Amino acid sequence: MKDGAPTYTNLDATGLKVGVITARWNYQLTHSLRDGAIGRLMELGVAEQDIVSIDIGGSYELPFAARHLIDTTEVDVVIPIGVLVKGSTMHFEYIAEAVSQGIMRVSLDTGVPVLFGVLTCLTEEQAKERAIGPGNHGPSWADTAVELGLMRKNA
Ligand code: RBF
């Protein structure tokens, strides 16, 4: 566990329904993050049939897809997953800003927690370190999702 990362205890996610949305851009990284998140969700007791996992095009589409999942399924919490790598144009800045604002808006508008499972990296190397192997952020997103999902479900 890295310094500064929160630790959680007594997370029992039995019965929790979780949406996972994965962007296909940088798919080797996003799918590694997704697998890390889903593996941890199941360790915490989420049943396979209670995980709704869909793929979408790129990170920009994550807020819409999160809203769609919330409106059409019974998910208690959503983990949107994307990897943005800074390029030589302004796309990175526009997409990162829109996605972070959009995700927060969906979460507060619907009352369903939606995490920020988006890596915004300056280089591919940074992205790999955070998506593959021991630095994979997916499992810690799963911990956060379960904590918030239970908060809402048990309210
Ligand atoms: N989507 C990502 O998830 N990660 C990226 O690094 C990324 N870079 C992009 C760079 C350019 C120049 C463009 C045009 C799109 C990029 N996208 C990226 C896709 C974006 O999130 C979205 O799917 C498309 O713009 C279609 O709405």
Image (cartoon, rainbow, N blue to C red):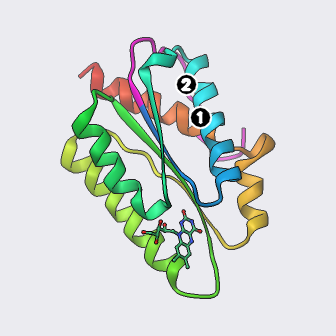
Residue that appears at 54% across and 55% down: 82
Q: Quadrant of residue 8?
A: top right
Residue 46 visible in the shown view: no
Q: Which mark is residue 37?
A: 1
Question: Under tag 1, what secondary structure?
Answer: helix
**Marks 1 and 2, Cα distance to the nearest angstrom?**
6 Å
Residue that appears at 74% across and 67% down: 124
- Residue matched to label 2: 41
In this rendering, position of residue 119 left or right of residue 145? right
Task: Give the main secondary structure of the magenta stretch.
Answer: loop
Picture coordinates of residue 96, whole percent (x, y) = 47, 69
Q: Is residue 73 above or below residue 50?
A: below
Viewer-proximal residue among 62 and 123: 62
Q: Is mark 1 in CB contact (under 8 Å) with mark 2? A: yes
Q: Is mark 2 within 8 Å of ligand 1?
A: no
Q: Is residue 116 magenta?
A: no
Category of crowding for the residue at label 2, using alpha-carbon neighbours closer than 10 angstroms: few (below 14), some (14–19), many (at least 20): many
Category of crowding for the residue at label 1, using alpha-carbon neighbours closer than 10 angstroms: few (below 14), some (14–19), many (at least 20): many
| Amino acid at pointer 2 | Leu
Q: Please report the bounds of the magenta region as a residue range.
A: 1-18
